[in-house]
Image: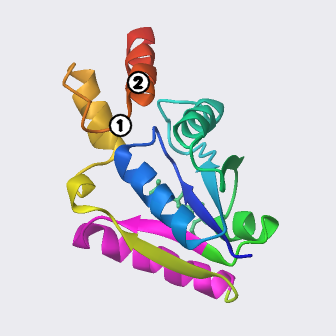
Amino acid sequence: MVTAVYPGSFDPATYGHLDVIRRASVSFDQVIVGVLHNSAKSPLFSVEERVNILEKATKSMPNVIVKPFDGLSVNFARQNHAKVIVRGLRAVTDFEYELQMAQTNRVLAPDIDTVFLTTSLEYAYLSSTIMKEVAKFNGDLSKFAPPEIIEAVMLKMYEK
Ligand code: PNS
């Protein structure tokens, strides 16, 4: 049984994240999506909201579970008996940061490997930040995330 963790901020999840989760769920027996409780950033959604959104969006994937986490991704992986950390790679611009993070994680936990999934071309430009920027100016979000996530974004923007 090979378990992979997919850590991230997911503020909120996009079609790009969901594509990585779906593809990881095909390659690994279990995928645990870890939503970082990052007090340094000021996210649009609370960690509970982000977990909730991802649970709804992944309910058709029986081997995917979503959990909040704090601290290091390698510790989250260990706590969940995962030997693999999954990350999505969109473009060369992601590479430097992702490589540094994977190498740091490898020093911290040589028994855990990082596996990169190249983002599907149709989502290569997409990020949570881009989606929030478009939402702020009332743009069409339908290409960025499923309807339930768009609804959550619009409600949250409305609250602000
Ligand atoms: O979705 P993001 O913001 O690109 O995800 C980044 C994340 C959560 C994977 C990364 O910041 C992370 O792993 N944070 C936890 C602390 C950690 O383990 N850092 C890597 C070693 S320095």
Q: Position of residue 117 (x, y in %)?
A: 41, 71
Looking at the image, residue 3 lies above or below residue 8: below
Give SS at disc 2.
Answer: helix
Give the residue pinned by disc 1.
Answer: 145
Give SS at disc 1.
Answer: loop
- Magenta-colored segment: predominant secondary structure: helix
Looking at the image, residue 60 lies above or below residue 46: below
Q: Which amino acid does the dot numbered 1 rest on?
A: Ala
The quadrant of the picture occupied by the C terminus is top left
Looking at the image, residue 149 lies above or below residue 38: above
Residue drawn at (69%, 58%), measured in percent from left and top?
71
Residue drawn at (60%, 85%), measured in percent from left and top?
106
The quadrant of the picture occupied by the N terminus is bottom right
Give the residue pinned by disc 2.
Answer: 153
Question: Which mark lies nearer to you, 1 or 2?
Answer: 1
Q: Position of residue 123 (x, y in %)?
A: 26, 53
Disc 2 CB within 8 Å of nearest ligand 1 atom: no
Q: Position of residue 63 (x, y in %)?
A: 66, 56
Q: Which amino acid does the dot numbered 2 rest on?
A: Val
Looking at the image, residue 97 lies above or below residue 156: below
Bounds of the magenta span?
85-109
Q: Position of residue 42 (x, y in %)?
A: 50, 36
Name the residue nearer the viewer: 88 or 69.
Answer: 88
Q: Regarding ligand 1, which quadrant of the image does it lie in?
A: bottom right
Disc 2: CA contacts within 10 A as few (<14), some (14-19) or many (>=20): many
